[in-house]
Image (spheres, grey):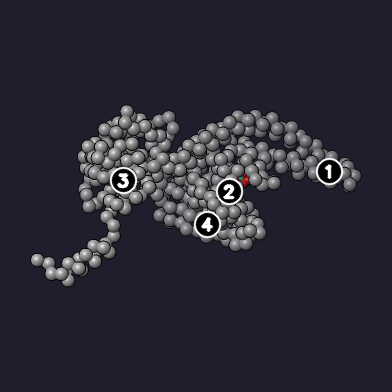
Amino acid sequence: MINPVTRAAIALRERRRAPDMAQIMSAVPVPVVLIDVDNRFRFVNHAAEQFLGISASGLSQLRLRDLVPEDNPLFLLVDQVRRSGATVSDHDMSVDSPRLNKRGMTVQGANLPEEPGSVVLVLQDASAARALDRQLAFRGAARSVTGMAAVLAHEVKNPLSGIRGAAQLLEGSVAEPDRELTLLIRDEADRIRDLVDRMEMFGEKPIERSPVNIHRVLERVRKLAQTGFAAHVRFTEAYDPSLPPVWGNRDQLVQVLLNLVKNAAEAVTNADTPHGEIMLATAYQHGMRVAIPGSRTRLDLPLMVSVRDNGAGIPEDIRPHLFEPFVTSKPSGNGLGLALVAKIIGDHGGLIEVDSRPGRTEFRLHLPVIVDEESDAA
Ligand SMILES: Nc1ncnc2c1ncn2[C@@H]1O[C@H](COP(=O)(O)OP(=O)(O)OP(=O)(O)O)[C@@H](O)[C@H]1O
Ligand SMILES: [Mg+2]
């Protein structure tokens, strides 16, 4: 027999107690499911019922393999979560089965230590997956200028050096007032050559890779920036010193980060941003994997490099074409910086994500690290 005081105390505690976890999960507007050690659906929230098109009671009778073919990478992800106990996420997953047809899903899996073998899955056709799609499209765009760039570089460079040489010869023989004109020809010829040199970088050459210390790259870029175009900008750095080397081309990675930092510096160089700031960060992210188009291979991209600024943000009308060549909002811009970034990161098998709003623009690079044979086989 519980005495009335105790009963009142219990009632009070009940009222104060947080709402039931299942209720909270059901209110979460993102599809969440819990599967048990036999891959049976133990719990689904409302968003998951809608996403999967099956009611909770219907799902409680099913196993994962009733919805998803057993050779689907989703099973690998679930296995990986069980084996590693870590959170694993996978972008651009597709399920094509009689009961479920989804493309470009992002799936995150986490284990539930209290329920051995159980896995919580968060499903989304998320913006990250869409960003990837777009980036693949940009890669195509970059490639279409590849051929053009090669022809242009070849056809323009030779006559250009002729023009430049001729102007230099004239310089010695013309009267003083005309010398200004020959100098102008020379300077403009140099400007065209620089542009053509940049275009040439779009060429389809296989990249030479070696282990690259990304912090040295960032350090170099910051120094170059601070002694030149970003002398007035404050830099902050948040690096994870334990990062393994990137598997890439050092000079090209310098080029990539220089372009991103230059854009950031240009974005904070105006009256609206009196305290221009650029933040450079690196981190190790477990479970960041992408599909390689046209194959079943999935690539690990655990190394994240971020360049953030507090400028006005990317103009709305430019966003859909951000990585395409010749897209610019700057009077003297070529619109080649980000096209080159996309091309180089694409060649590295990496991925770029962009978040931009007024006061905060962030470009995140996801890059591969060296994988040793042993963990490759695992
Ligand atoms: N950090 C940023 N903040 C705001 N807008 C940006 C940022 N980075 C890029 N942009 C926008 O994207 C456009 C394209 O950038 P991109 O680097 O490709 O060319 P550009 O900087 O205009 O010219 P170039 O790099 O060839 O000198 C820019 O003109 C600008 O409008
Ligand atoms: Mg630029």
For label 3, the SS is loop
Instruction: Tell me: residue 224, above or below residue 48.
Output: below
User: Which residue appears at 79% of the width and 41% of the height?
Assistant: 185
Tell me the mark number nearer the camera, choosing from 4 and 2. Answer: 2
Cα–Cα span, label 1 and label 2? 39 Å
Residue located at (77% from left, 38% from top): 164
Tell me the CA gap for discs 4 and 2: 17 Å
- Considering depth in this image, is 155 or 29 the residue closer to the camera? 29
Name the quadrant of the N terminus: bottom left
Which of pointers 3 and 2 lies earlier in the amino acid sequence? 3
Residue at image mark 3: 45
Identify residue for label 2: 314
In front here: 284 or 312? Answer: 312
Pointer 4 residue: 279
Residue type, mark 1 in image:
Leu
Of badges 4 and 3, the one in the foreground is 3
Identified at 42% across, 34% down, the residue is: 292
Q: Quadrant of residue 72?
A: top left
Residue type indicated by callout 3: Asn
How far separated are the C-alphas under marks 1 and 4? Answer: 43 Å
N-term mark: 4 or 3: 3
Q: Quadrant of the C terminus?
A: top left
In the image, the residue with mark 2 has its CB under 8 Å from the nearest atom of ligand 1? yes
Mark 2 crowdedness (10 Å alpha carbons): few <14, some 14-19, many ≥20: some
The answer to whether mark 4 and mark 2 are in CB contact below 8 A is no
Amino acid type of the residue tagged 2 in the rendering: Ile
Mark 3 or mark 1: whose residue is earlier in sequence? 3
How crowded pointer 4 is (Cα within 10 Å; few <14, some 14-19, many 20+) is rated as: some
Proximity of marks 1 and 4: CB atoms separated by less than 8 Å: no
306 relative to 2 in the view: left or right: right
